[in-house]
Structure formats: C-alpha cells, structure tokens
Image (cartoon, rainbow, N blue to C red):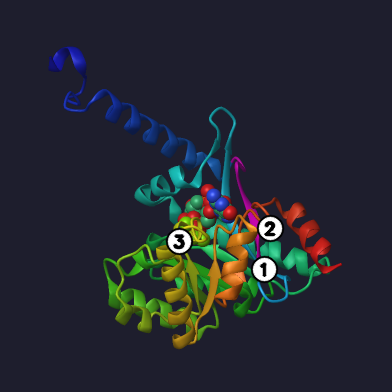
Amino acid sequence: RAKRDGRNGYCFFTGEMQAQSVRALELENALRRALKRQQLSLHYQPQLCLGSGRVIGAEALLRWQHPQLGAVSPAEFIPIAESSGLILEIGEWVLREAAGQLRRWLDAGLPPLRMAVNLSSVQFRHADLPELVSRIMAEAGLAPEMLELELTEGVALTDPLGAIAVMADLNARGVRLSIDDFGTGYSSLSYLKKFSAYKLKIDRSFVRDLTEDPEDKAIVNAIISLARSLGLQTIAEGVETEGQLALLREQGCDEVQGFLFSRPLPAEGFAAFVCQHVA
Ligand code: C2E
Ligand code: MG
Ligand code: MG
Ligand code: MG
C-alpha cells in the first residue's frame, strides 16, 4: 500500500492532505519571488467617522496577483508567509508602501488621514519592530500618530508580557494600536487593560447579523460600553447594510468600515472616493 500510494515516505498523508501541502509549498516558493516581481500591491478600504460621515482613514490590505494562479487571498497566503518567515520582509514592505502612499496622498492635497496597517504576530515578536516603525514613518515625513497598527488578541498568546512591553514601546512612540477582530480571541479583560490600545475593532462576525440576532446586538453593545469605560475608540468592520449602520449609530460606535461605503480600492480609486466625500 505504502509503495503504491506515496513516495518518499509520505504514504500516511491522505490524498487531500497531500494536495493541500503541495499547494502550500507551491505558494511558498511563488511568494518568495512575488515581492521582487512586483506581484504584491496594497488596496485601501475607507474608514469613516460615523457622526460626520467623513473619511478619516484607510486600512491597507495586501493583494497578490500571480500570473498563473491569479489573485491569491491573504487569508490563504498570510499564514504561509508567517510559517516560512517571509512575513518579516513582506510586512516591512507593506509598512513602507502604506506610509509612502499616505505621503503621496497628502502631497496631492488630500485631507489628513490615518493609515491602518495589519501586523502579524510574527512581526510583533521581532525585536526591531518599534524602531523599524519609527524609522519608516520618519522617512516618509509622517507623524507617528498617523499610523495605526491593527493587532489581533493573538499577539499576546505566546508571550503576553513581551507583547505588552512592545505595545507600550509603540505607544510611547506615538503610534496608535487597534485590536482587530475584537471579541473573537482568547485574551482576558485584565490583559486588555495593559494593551495600550487606542481602539477596539468590532469583528465582522458580530456585525453581520446585528439587526436579526439579539445576542449579537448585546455583544456589540457590551463592546462599545467596555471601550467607552476604558477610554477607547470603537470601529465596526464589515458594515454592509443601512440597518447595521443605524444600530451602530444608536449604540454610539465611533467609526465604520465596510462594503456599504466601499470595498478595498487601489490607491487612485481611494483618492477619488475621498474627494467625492469631501465635496
Ligand atoms: P482583517 O484585517 O480583519 O481585514 C478585514 C477583511 O474583511 C478584509 O479581507 C476586507 O476586504 C474584508 N471586508 C471589509 N469590509 C467587508 C464587508 O463589508 N463585508 C465582507 N464580507 N468583508 C469585508 P481581506 O482583504 O481578504 O483580508 C483578510 C485578512 O488578511 C485580514 O483580515 C488580515 O488579517 C489579513 N491581512 C490582509 N492584509 C494584510 C497585511 O498586510 N499584513 C498582515 N499581517 N495581514 C493582512
Ligand atoms: Mg485589519
Ligand atoms: Mg478585522
Ligand atoms: Mg477579520
């Protein structure tokens, strides 16, 4: 059986597992070359102030267009970038590209905006991160306050004290921290207190059924009250309907982001969106 089914001792893999790991290996090799071949780009999704309706920021979201494989989703390639260590190089490119883009928008006359960048826990555990972030913002001629780093609660999973120290360092440098996918992780409220967070980002899974599910409504309400009592801002992700928006307004959410306003856009599209909303 072993001889017939598999080579190189991989006979214990099921066919499907094998196909998955072959795909992962293929993607890893392709990802290694993607940066140099300029296949990676950033799209930007508007973040709006719920009260004024103004665009106040952008979330940078990584895109990978491979000539043969087509568009590969970050949900698939980010974990591969993390396990292979490639995320350090890619993450640094993302930070530099996002900062450079914000610089170009400001130079082109766009109103002041904040740039939100997603950070992997692997980057977070890397000793140089705070220094690197400061350097990139300075090189782009941007105040550190214009950068918001989106972290998930998972950054504190393996080394909570180390993570808390890095957060305090970033915070002292003026960089803002937002807890992404809030409510889906495992961190305790006593950690949250020590996170130096500026904002809680309410996970899309609670927003989705907000208008039909009384439990989701209660959870969103609780997150917003918690944030308010801790002096934190709130943003809801994945807002798709007017009904969800109305409830979030009623509950006092500060900011919103989602397909109702705009999908993530290439840089030029984002600039056009901002101009329409200013006029
Ligand atoms: P995330 O940071 O929670 O980003 C939100 C995701 O929800 C994005 O998916 C966005 O396109 C999508 N989204 C936004 N509004 C809506 C909506 O109204 N409805 C629905 N159904 N979806 C919405 P995307 O771009 O595929 O990114 C997936 C995840 O990949 C991100 O989740 C983030 O964890 C990760 N990611 C993306 N870019 C980067 C990056 O530069 N670095 C790192 N470390 N992770 C990244
Ligand atoms: Mg995010
Ligand atoms: Mg999120
Ligand atoms: Mg998410």
Q: Magenta part of the protein: which range? A: 37-48
* Res. 261 mark: 2
Q: Is residue 220 left or right of residue 275?
A: left
Looking at the rendered structure, the kind of residue marked 2 is: Phe
Disc on the earlier residue, 1 or 2 = 1
Q: Residue at x 35, y 74 (%)?
A: 163
Looking at the rendered structure, the kind of residue marked 1 is: Leu
Q: Quadrant of the N terminus?
A: top left
Q: Is residue 252 visible?
A: yes
Q: CA distance from mark 3 to mark 1?
A: 19 Å
**Residue at the disc numbered 1:** 48
Q: Nearer the viewer, mark 3 or mark 1?
A: 3
Q: How many marks?
A: 3
Q: Is residue 89 visible?
A: no
- Whether 47 is drawn above or below 166: the answer is above
Q: CA distance from mark 2 to mark 3?
A: 18 Å
Q: Are marks 1 and 2 in contact (CB under 8 Å)?
A: yes
* Res. 93 mark: none
Specify few, some or many for label 3: CA neighbours under 10 Å numbering under 14, 14-19, or 20 or more.
many
| Residue 34 found in image quarter | top right
Q: Residue at x 42, y 32 (%)?
A: 26
For mark 1, give the secondary structure: strand
Q: CA distance from mark 1 to mark 2?
A: 8 Å
Residue 222 spot, x, y in % from top left: 42, 76
Instruction: Please state which of residues 204 and 112 is positioned toward the viewer in this rendering.
Output: 204
Specify few, some or many for label 2: CA neighbours under 10 Å numbering under 14, 14-19, or 20 or more.
some
Residue 9 spot, x, y in % from top left: 17, 25
Q: Residue at x 57, y 68 (%)?
A: 247
**Residue at the disc numbered 3:** 206
